[in-house]
Image (cartoon, coloured by chain):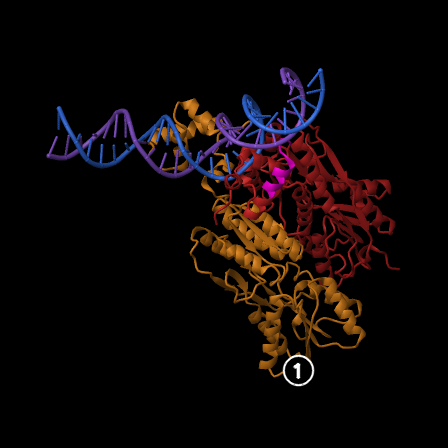
Chain colours: A orange, B red, C blue, D purple
Amino acid sequence: MKHVTIKDVAKQLNVSISSVSRAFNDKYDIKKETKELILKTAEEMGYFPNPIAKKLSQNKTFNIGVVVPEFINEYYSEIIIGIQEVFMAYGYQVLIAQSDENPEIELKNVKTLIHSMVDGLIIAPTMESTNMEYYLKELNNGCPIVFMSRVKENLQASKVLFNNKKWAFFATEHLIRQGYTKIYYLAGSKNLNVSVDRIEGFKRAMNKHKIPKENYKILETGLLAEDGMQIMEDLIYNHDLPDAIFCFNDRVAMGVISKLKSNAIKVPQDIALMGFTETRMVNLMTPKLSSVKQPTFDIGKNAAELLFKQINDSLMEPQTIVLNGELTIRESSVRKL
Amino acid sequence: MKHVTIKDVAKQLNVSISSVSRAFNDKYDIKKETKELILKTAEEMGYFPNPIAKKLSQNKTFNIGVVVPEFINEYYSEIIIGIQEVFMAYGYQVLIAQSDENPEIELKNVKTLIHSMVDGLIIAPTMESTNMEYYLKELNNGCPIVFMSRVKENLQASKVLFNNKKWAFFATEHLIRQGYTKIYYLAGSKNLNVSVDRIEGFKRAMNKHKIPKENYKILETGLLAEDGMQIMEDLIYNHDLPDAIFCFNDRVAMGVISKLKSNAIKVPQDIALMGFTETRMVNLMTPKLSSVKQPTFDIGKNAAELLFKQINDSLMEPQTIVLNGELTIRESSVRKL
DNA sequence: ACCGTTTCCGGTATCGTTTCCGGAAAAATA
DNA sequence: TATTTTTCCGGAAACGATACCGGAAACGGT
């Protein structure tokens, strides 16, 4: 597959390389007719500017890198789609890498992407604190980076966050208002900032409504359905059951539901349930799961726009965007009389 | 962020550019000590070869493109991970594009990727037949392409397929052997080859076991949970219920389960259920869903290896790999006495 | 008729590599 | 010692584009 080059077009028309280049870059310094002629014959010859050469001569790759912890679940997939939408419109390619929730792979991914000369990076770290120093070093070195999701609010960098505190608070308060008084929170992993924030929101709701300490528990779990099943097994075994459970995410909630069902414990009659980071399955479960929806597309879009700005203005001040969600009440958390 | 170039390293050591290049490319024509010296000082100076320049001079991008219908569901996500694993090891970047199940976007994606000079493509078409002529033209033009999943077996190109006929047959036969005699198949969309193949497998099982035609139905549906719900609603409304349902995929099955539950129809006591293209949720559903697991990682890996071969051997004969799956029987399809 | 602008275009350097070619030095052979 | 072979290295030409510079027309105003 021999590619037609700018030279071939120039030779064909007996014009200079420069003219062909100018015709394609839509600049001044070229007569309308020649430009059209050039574009027409180029089209006929099947010529298009070689992006690699363009990248080299302009010292830009028009690539940006995205590093996410995983994209098996819809959450990051949707974020990626949001990012792609924005950057494709700007003529950029988006390189995606997934870290498999492993900070070492994450660091390797970032290094690979930087070595492959991306013009900028969007990173959703697996956990904060592990690789942050390295990323901030690169950032200060002039490599544009935008962070998403799992980073602290006081991080000196541009970032897009979800207001976990607030929405965990709302979700918890909803349970309280339904009349549940013994509420457990399955809190994910304490290594995650989002976890800490949601715990904070949970506690705040408890305090506001003056629920005594002995009436609630915060239990560390993982992020997976299996983790939800595991902890429910323990609780059932210990006869330590609340009347409502707030889960770190929908996957954990699914694990909980499954375990409860197999023990003939009814949701929400015996135990109410609330998820988080809504998935598309909430309506397919029985009972339908109440949950907090995160604006995944918007997280992606905002991160992309932020990065684009940063690429084109190296002096830009770090900017933080905090997005809100949506609490949808479904069957799993509604008190049945 | 000024990059160190090969020239800087050469000047520093008073050697030629060529020598530095040779040191990095591990070729002959260079003394061991000089090579080591060069590599050492390059390391110290923070030099690494500019990939863009390398691409230009070698006329290779070391990028491959992957086009999938979507990656919201685990199926293609897992395939992509398989592809990435292989190609990252070979030092390639993987560019991912998703077509949103839309043939026009798909064509646009492919064109964009070809224009961005990928060394090869892996395509999982949204439906066959729409854009195939274009892809085959590019293939014959010398652009290495491997197809996945939704293409016909007689397509003149390298491809990785799942044996839909066989596994649909097994799944159906299992239902028959459980003693179900009135079995409906919710068949996905007839525009999809996989659909046609699975129908074939379904029919074959019916014929083998001499189930009379009036005892089974093949109903066209979509690919989504909503489609499953819709069709169940119709069937329930028309009092046209079988004693077992085989679903095109797990999502449709989830829709079916959900609709059945809300109508107090029990699975599997009243109606048994079988899914396909197993998702990670099968064990979280009640009842646990029987399904056929596709070897997603292997599909990805095989496609990648096939493409890699094709890239490095332009004369390679088109090769077809047909993979097998795994039928796991769970609660939803086991006859309760 | 002269000159200054504008408009358009070609030549050339540059981006950072790889690769080919040829030559010098070192080693092997006669 | 003379000659051949091998080993190693530098120079220069690609790769395909863009950016800058300056020159040649064309044009209009005095």
Which residue occupies 65% across, 37% down? B32
Q: Amino acid at mark 1?
A: Lys
Q: What residue sits right under mark 1 in the picture?
A: A213
Which residue occupies 68% across, 81% down? A215
Above or below: residue D6 compared with residue B216: above
Above or below: residue A153 compared with residue B140: below
Query: In front here: A229 or A56?
Result: A56
Place residue A335 in its image quadrant. bottom right
- Mark yes or no: residue B7 visible: yes
Residue extent of the magenta highlight: B28-39
* Residue A13 position within the rendered picture, expressed as x and y whole percent measured from the top left: 41, 23
The dominant secondary structure in magenta is helix
* Residue B219 position within the rendered picture, expressed as x and y whole percent measured from the top left: 71, 46
Above or below: residue A50 compared with residue B170: above
Query: In front here: B39 or C12?
Result: B39
* Residue B223 position within the rendered picture, expressed as x and y whole percent measured from the top left: 67, 49
- Mark yes or no: residue B237 visible: no
Residue B299: within the magenta? no
Question: In which quadrant of the rendered image does the C terminus of chain B lie?
Answer: bottom right
Above or below: residue B1 compared with residue B26: below
Left or right: where B334 falls relative to A216: right
Place residue A256 in its image quadrant. bottom right
Query: In front here: B95 or B244?
Result: B95
Output the chain of dot 1. Answer: A
Query: In front here: A79 or A145?
Result: A145
Residue B29: within the magenta? yes
Left or right: where A153 falls relative to B202: left
* Residue A126 position within the rendered picture, expressed as x and y whole percent measured from the top left: 63, 59
Please rate how many residues cluster around mark 1, counting C-alpha atoms within 10 Å: few if below 14, some from 14 to 19, many from 20.
Answer: few
Dot 1: element: helix
